[in-house]
Image (cartoon, rainbow, N blue to C red):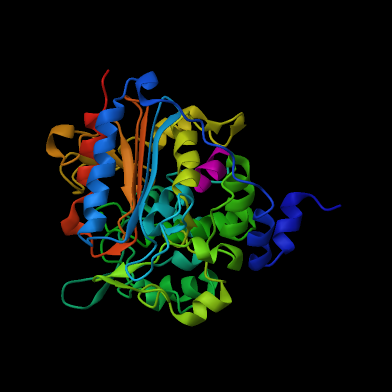
Amino acid sequence: MLPNAMLRQILPTTLIAALALAAPAAELPTADPESVWMSSARLERVDLWLDEMVGAKRAAGFVTLVSRHGKVVHHRATGTKGMDVTDAMPLDALFDIASMTKPITAAAALMLLEEGRFTLGEPVPKHLPEFADLMIADDAGGLTPAKRTMTVRHLFTHTSGVRDPRGRAETYAFRTMDAYMKEFSQLPLQAEPGTRWIYGDSLDVLGYLVERLSGQGLDAFLQERVFDPLGMADTHYWPPASKQARRALLVVNGKDDPARVSREPPEAGKAKTFIAGASGLHTTAADYWRFCQMLLDGGTLQNKRLLGPRTVSWMAQNHLEEGTDFRPGLGYGLGVAVVTDRGKLDYPYSAGSYYWGGSQGTVFWIDPSEQLIGILMVQVRPGGDLKLREKFAALVYSAILN
């Protein structure tokens, strides 16, 4: 019988998802809020707030999860799967987490760093030669050679200078990431590497680096090295047909987008071959909690170690070069935003907390000081004016008693 690693290298992507179905979802460790010094009555404010949001048709439905000291004290589904459907939002609903894919890709890359496959300061072209001889686009529309070397750290921190002006639906028209990278690597940079925080596409390059160094597709690597060990049985790039009924519908400008035309062309959904490091994963609140708890526990969950504790703490430190503008009160680590001055934030996260969100309104945070994890899942665009992330965090932190 072939070993798992070899087996996954020869299996097509569609079968990887099918194999993952064999692993049942593990039970979450639950506890009464008071047992971890949180207030049940105050956590009920989260329920009341979300009920109001659904009643006012600001969003179709939500799934929220809160844990402290490794115990889940709140896990609630609210509303329906879409604006025009009557099916209740299931607790195990699948959400397109968009950019919440990025921290998972970053963790996968750090696993390879721990194996000595690369260092943060190494030039990207050493491993991806297509990114050699980089050019910078200037304000006049011309091109000049880059003066600085793009390093792997720049990919983790979104300071590589890369940016694709096309939207997600256009990039997903490429059949594979390999085909996309051949064209993307020839686009001019928007800034010298290390000098500007330019969000998004750096993590696609980092995911491509994982593929190149591991010899596996990113989906196969994540399945074998992250999802299977953590029991994330409901996490997929392209959810199988058997789970489609559990998908929360994307709501765009108040209307359901069941075919997801705003996110990807129909051909991509049929082919299921475009696998990105920056976005694309679908998961449940419970599955994403397992990933977060692994990080909070220093790289291990239920005796399965993915990363060393020093690597996790390194991930959650500010890695931006001095003078690189990001956001007030925040630095940026290896794939996550890091709180440096909580007095400048609209969130009550403790200093040293780290987090990120997705363009459909999802968010997670990990607060080591409070041993606290918060996860909010929703599918709504645009959602910035709803202030979902700020309000959810305020309600959760108000429930901490000690």
Q: Position of residue 312 (x, y in %)?
A: 45, 34
- Compared to 400, does 185 lie above or below? below
- Compared to 148, does 304 lie above or below? above
Q: Is residue 396 visible?
A: yes
Q: Picture quarter containing residue 176?
A: bottom right
- Tell me how many marks there are: 0
Q: Residue drawn at (52%, 57%), measured in percent from left and top?
A: 209
Relative placement, left or right, of 170 versus 217 is left
Q: Position of residue 199 (x, y in %)?
A: 29, 58
Relative placement, left or right, of 185 versus 49 is right
Q: Picture quarter containing residue 259?
A: bottom left
Q: Position of residue 36 (x, y in %)?
A: 37, 21
- Compared to 264, does 94 lie above or below? above
Q: Residue furthest right?
A: 1
Q: Picture quarter containing residue 164?
A: bottom left
Which quadrant holds the C terminus? top left
Read off the magenta span: 107-114
Q: Residue drawn at (27%, 60%), measured in percent from left and top?
A: 59
Q: Residue furthest front?
A: 86
Q: Residue drawn at (16%, 72%), measured in percent from left and top?
A: 139
